[in-house]
Amino acid sequence: MKLTFWGAAQQVTGSMHLLEIGHYKILIDCGLDYEKETYQEENQQFPFDPASINLVILTHAHIDHSGNLPTLVRLGFEGQVLCTPPTADLTSILLFDSVELFLRKAGRKPRTKRGNFSGPKPLYLHKHVMDTIDRFVTIAFNKPFKINGDISLTFVPVGHLLGAAAAILTINDNGIEKKIAFTGDIGRENYPVLVNPEPLPEVDYVVSEATYGGRMHTKDQTLEERLVQEITEACIKSPGRLIIPAFSIGRTQSLVFALNQIFTKKLLPPIQIFVDSPMAIQATEVYRKHHNLVNQEAKDFYQTMGDEFEFEHLAYVQTMKESKDVSNYFDPCIIISSAGMLEGGRIQDHLYYNIQNYYCTILFIGYCAKGTLGYKLLSGAPIVRIKDREMMVYATIRQTDLLSGHGDHNDLVKTIKQTGQPKKVFLVHGEDKSLQSLSLALQEDGFNVEVPERGATFEL
């Protein structure tokens, strides 16, 4: 049995691991690697023949885990994609949105005389996404699924995003039973809407994410306290507006529920809230559809107070006209819009009209990769470029990690310790400092740890 690391190896994005059991090949995740500016060209090249892959296991919907599936299909993959039901629904939304992003990039320059794309050629089109969705086979949590006579799969809930799972494979390798756990992305406890990560079983090998290795989440303040503080400062003490960049899928739903609780408890006077993201509206419907998989707090709220994602003074913005009307709303308000790193979406319109507004606060609630507009603002850049215009930054820039969807260093260590004494722990999906910090901590606890390079193969 061989395991090769083809993505998220000594970096964060592009999760993709190839497990070979004899001649049977399983790809665990197939995400977009967008570490380089030429990522659309980079992701066209697979280091193996896509037609040779028998099966894909998808841990969750986020684009750095799912986003290159249509390319795999376009280039010859004909097998099934196994995932949980919410993951199938959320991935569909994200993949269609990726096509729109590719097409916008392709059309940025005038087309050639022959009518060809003059910008970067799209990685895939709507047809390829539909072909990919046709391959989804959904599996419930905690129910072993027999892939063939030698391999079975169990999905274990890990929080992080609705439907996110660790993939536990039990394999008969020439008469010897071996177990391997792929954690996907591990969530955190007591997160709005999402269940807590469940304990993983004892296994022989672990492939774990390391996003927050060496880093701890804020512990001296609750999310409710922080949101009340930020809203009070931005909207009540002064008649301003609070803009919160938030990923449409996952982060927005948890934030809306947290705000619903705050205003239901009357911790603040009523303030108009706008959710300006059509994709967030679609994702919220998926959360409603799979309401049996939200946490008990959200279920109890639904039973006593009604829909977690609807309340007075909350408006979902659908059309571009409605979005422009939000920009012209002059009373104090909260605007939640995507994308979280400010690299596209309607958030750029709101920034364009508010980045030079002294009465505006921009609150970041998630990670911003280096090079993104969000990263530049968080780094204190006094001037940023928005819509081809250099603009002074007069708005107040704030950040909190209380809505981060990833478990911190202690959560990662706890998850790995649950697996007993595996023969080896492989760390992926992290920046170098995080990988090394988590590796050192685990080694001090007696674990055999490997931080594989891209393309490294291991016999298990």
Image (tube, rainbow, N blue to C red):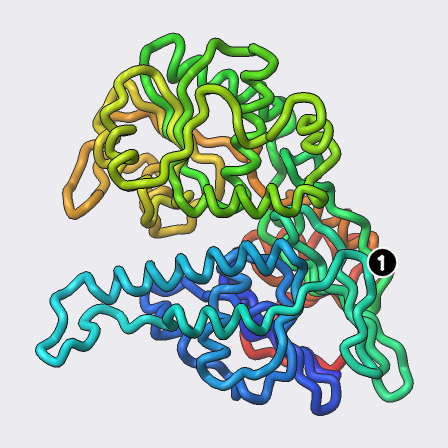
Name the foreground residue: 115 vs 195. 115
Going by the image, does 209 lie left or right of 316? right
Residue at (21% x, 37% y) in the render: 383
Residue at (46% x, 42% y) in the render: 281
Residue 142: x, y in percent?
81, 57
Residue 410 shows up from this direction: no
Residue at (16% x, 41% y) in the render: 390
Residue 234: x, y in percent?
38, 17
Whether residue 444 is situated above or below residue 332 in the rendered picture: below
Residue 401: x, y in percent?
54, 35
Name the foreground residue: 305 vs 218. 305
Going by the image, does 281 lie left or right of 150? left
Q: Residue furthest bottom?
A: 23
Residue 28: x, y in percent?
63, 71
Q: Which three-letter amino acid code belongs to the residue tagged 1?
A: Pro
Question: Splitting the image into 4 quarters, where does residue 439 fall?
Answer: bottom right
| Quadrant in the picture for the N terminus | bottom right
Question: Splitting the image into 4 quarters, where does residue 447 fall?
Answer: bottom right
| Quadrant in the picture for the C terminus | bottom right
Residue 187 shows up from this direction: yes
Residue at (24% x, 66% y) in the render: 106
Name the foreground residue: 172 vs 107. 107
Whether residue 107 is situated above or below residue 411 in the rendered picture: below
Count of marks, rendered view: 1
SS at circle 1? loop
Going by the image, does 325 lie left or right of 12? left
Name the foreground residue: 381 vs 93. 93
Residue that carries the numbered disc 1 in the rendered image: 201
